[in-house]
Amino acid sequence: MPFDLKPERDLGEDLNVGLIHAPLTALGPGVRVGIWLTGCSRGCPGCLSPDFFKPQKKERQNPLKVAATVLATAKDLNLTALTISGGEPFSQPKALKEFLTSVRANGLDDVLVYSGYLVEELLVKWPWLPKLTTAIVDGPYLQNEPSTEIFRGSKNQKLTVFDPAFAGPYAAWAKEKKHKAQFLVGQGQIRILGIPKPGDYEKAYAAAAKTLKKSP
Ligand code: SF4
């Protein structure tokens, strides 16, 4: 086995994986692997990922299997950074912890997580968070408080960097002016990765829909 992973064990909880994509340049500093975990009951109006609210049975995977896939993807592209979004990643906290422990132990040293919880709530419920992640963007999306900043959809959301070694890159990324949404187009679907500027979503979606119409 190319990575130092423990044998898979039954935690009574799997990760619900909606998507793994790399290279990801639209969500976090630099170039990263992205993983979107399904399951979220908040239903924030205007959420960009409503299809990730309800986990599908076929998405359930042992967290160590997911770690192996993510690590192989990172290795192929020579990446050491990961962004975890969703859905709500903490809707499967045991499996998430197992996954994070494994990817951190195998060289992914920069892990950014997006969560609808407040960081204060997360630290009480899951105190291992600062040890296993680098940074978090917290809070639900509030449609009536739109943000133009690259790292968040609404102004209530905060970026907290746990690892001081990464404070510089995260501060620089948070100040970037150019939004970098990526599109995945195919199989009759359009998915936007990243956070478009307020008002740009509809334009971007229409452009992507045009591309989809043209594609075979
Ligand atoms: S918490 Fe996040 S994933 Fe859940 S509905 Fe709100 S914006 Fe969407």
Image (cartoon, rainbow, N blue to C red):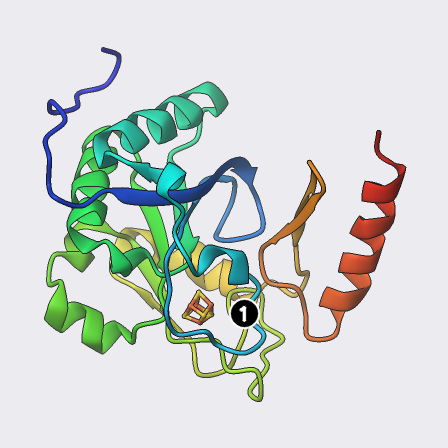
Q: Nearer the viewer, residue 107 or 207?
A: 207
- Determine the image quadrant of residue 48: bottom right
* Number of numbered tags placed on the structure image: 1
Q: Position of residue 196 (x, y in %)?
A: 66, 64
Residue at image location 42% in from the left, 56% down from the top: 86
Q: Which secondary structure lies at badge 1?
A: loop
Q: Position of residue 109 (x, y in %)?
A: 29, 40
Check the image and report above or below for 108 versus 181: above
Image quadrant of ligand 1 equals: bottom left
Residue at image location 41% in from the left, 57% down from the top: 54
Residue 34 is at least partly visible in this image: no
Q: Position of residue 33 (x, y in %)?
A: 45, 38
Residue 76 is at least partly visible in this image: yes
Give the residue pinned by disc 1.
Answer: 47
Q: Is mark 1 within 8 Å of ligand 1?
A: yes
Check the image and report above or below for 204 versus 125: above
- Determine the image quadrant of residue 135: bottom left
- Determine the image quadrant of residue 215: top right
Residue 127 in the figure: left or right of residue 150: left
Q: Nearer the viewer, residue 96 or 216?
A: 216
Q: Nearer the viewer, residue 101 or 92?
A: 92
Residue at image location 26% in from the left, 59% down from the top: 90
Mark 1, residues whose alpha carbon is within 10 Å: few (<14), some, or many (≥20)? some
Q: Amino acid at mark 1?
A: Cys
The C terminus - image quarter: top right
Check the image and report above or below for 189 versus 65: below
Q: Position of residue 88 (x, y in %)?
A: 35, 61
